[in-house]
Image (tube, rainbow, N blue to C red):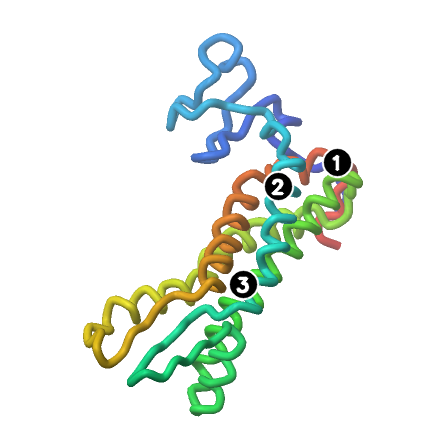
Amino acid sequence: MTGQALTAQSMGAISCEFCGMLVSNNFIESHSQHCPRCDAHLHSRKANSLKRTTALLIAASILYFPANLYPILTLISFGKSTTNTIMGGVIELANAGQWSIAAIVFIASVFVPIFKIAALFFLVLSVHFKMSWKTRQRALLYRFTEYVGRWSMIDIFMISILIALVKLQAIATVTAGPGAIAFAAVVIITMFAAMTFDPRLIWDNSGEEDDGQ
């Protein structure tokens, strides 16, 4: 089925980016520039969305390398120091037979950050070059990317819990390595990148919608 894509803009309304409520332009002109439900300031589009998202993605891409090359965890036990990178930890878990945990850590800490950066770069480029292809699928890709990104923090949570549980400081000490700082920065920056990207831009050049065909 072929037809013009139905968007808030084509209906003469603005979608609140916080609660999703559709507010008509007539209401905004006669009453307030704030959402009547959550009182958030209404914007037709986020200012400089593509520029801010691109800058954050470049920063995340640069930090991704030290996040994986530097140790994320240092364990000192009986005078012996052991360091592990993210992939080193995955390999050790796999060698120990903990395949399910190794898979979870790999997906959450290695695959998801790469996927999120690549997906957001693709969405930015698709908007920049005014693509009208698969509009609905790209909007769903953004929602999925925004949702799964938070699970990349699983490694940081594991380290935090491990540090809190290790009480016998004279026998064993666990400290976060420089890779953990870089990795946490990657996750936080990509979360901000997803927040600064305006998914409404995807629909601006939708043109003739192919309805997923």
For residue 205, the mark is: 1
- Label 3 SS: helix
Q: Do the CB atoms of the residues marked 2 and 3 lie less than 8 Å apart?
A: no
Q: Earlier in the sequence, mark 2 or mark 3?
A: 2
Q: Residues within 10 Å of mark 3 (few under 14, many from 20)?
A: many
Q: Nearer the viewer, residue 160 or 178?
A: 178
Taking the image as shown, residue 86 lies to the left or right of residue 3, namely left
Q: Earlier in the sequence, mark 2 or mark 1?
A: 2
The residue type indicated by label 2 comes to Thr
Q: Nearer the viewer, residue 154 or 141?
A: 154
The residue type indicated by label 3 comes to Ala
Of badges 2 and 3, nearer the viewer stands: 3
Residue receiving disc 3 = 67
For residue 53, the mark is: 2
Residue depicted at x 70% and y 46%: 135
Q: Residues within 10 Å of mark 2 (few under 14, many from 20)?
A: many
Of badges 2 and 1, nearer the viewer stands: 2
Q: Position of residue 9 (x, y in %)?
A: 63, 27
Q: Position of residue 167 (x, y in %)?
A: 19, 73
Cα gap from disc 2 to disc 1, whole angstroms:
19 Å
